[in-house]
Amino acid sequence: MVEGLEMYKAATVITEALYRRVVGEQVEKMSELRNTDIIYVTDLVACSHKYHLRRKYPELTISFEPSSVLGILLHKGLEEVLMSEGYEVEKSIETYVEIGSKRYIIKGRLDAYNPNTRVVVEIKSSRSSKDLPRGHHVEQLNIYLNMLNAESGILVYITPDKIVEYSIQREKIDLKNLVKNVVNDIVHPRYSWECNYCIFKKICTYYVEEQKPQ
């Protein structure tokens, strides 16, 4: 035992409070995760098979990893700052796309939105500041811009050694085609690194181990 450590008793007060909030919010979304009519914007920029596995096994998405909790707290803190600057935070948006005879609800949640300037802010926390901005983050923000018909947004990264932000201009997208890719499970994986970070990799037929450089 570390010298002097025996004099301190373990406590769980703060951890329990965080657990109730973080896990509670995830549990509340279980029924929505099972709803095959709902597609999230984040589904449109990720492996299409992940969407289908999440609908079947939504409980596997529940997480209480310290890195995830840290990211949530960082978002909450920056959102509080932006609220004082006149931004709306955690603003839900949705649109509809019809594929064949079925109508899908495309749902997104903006980290922050300035109703006066119509600027959308997307906040990302990361362990590394390499290769920024990341393509799927730019695409996610661009989908939001198209859904709102807004001209521009800000993609901000907070890492252990940097705070950087990028101005992203709206580019036209084919939202219906993106939805088709997800519904028909066309792209799996979307990026070579996705499988290594995927919670479904142990039950996924399409799992591919990322090849490391020789």
Image: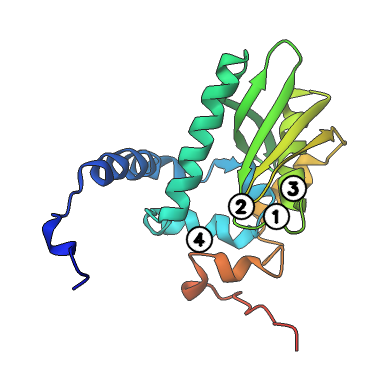
Residue 38 is marked as none
Q: Is residue 167 shown above or below 8?
A: above
The crowd level at tag 3 (other Cα within 10 Å; few <14, some 14-19, many 20+) is some
The crowd level at tag 1 (other Cα within 10 Å; few <14, some 14-19, many 20+) is some
Mark 4 vs mark 3, CA separation in Å:
18 Å
| Residue 152 relative to residue 86: left or right | right
The crowd level at tag 2 (other Cα within 10 Å; few <14, some 14-19, many 20+) is few
Residue 100 position in % (x across, y down): 70, 43
CB-based contact (under 8 Å), mark 3 and mark 1: no
Residue holding disc 3:
178
Q: Is residue 95 shown above or below 86?
A: below
- Looking at the image, tell me whether mark 4 or mark 3 is earlier in sequence order: 4
- Looking at the image, tell me whether mark 3 or mark 2 is earlier in sequence order: 2
Residue holding disc 2:
126
CB-based contact (under 8 Å), mark 4 and mark 2: no
Mark 2 vs mark 1, CA separation in Å:
7 Å
- Looking at the image, tell me whether mark 3 or mark 1 is earlier in sequence order: 1
Residue holding disc 4:
53
- Looking at the image, tell me whether mark 4 or mark 2 is earlier in sequence order: 4
Residue 61 position in % (x across, y down): 43, 55
| Residue 20 relative to residue 191: left or right | left
- In front: label 1 or label 4: 1
What amino acid is found at the position of numbered circle 1 in the picture?
Ser
Q: How many numbered circles does the render carry?
A: 4
Residue at image position (82%, 35%) is 168
Quarter of the image for residue 175 reads top right
Residue at image position (76%, 14%) is 117
Q: Is residue 145 shown above or below 67?
A: above
Q: Secondary structure at mark 2?
A: loop
CB-based contact (under 8 Å), mark 3 and mark 2: no
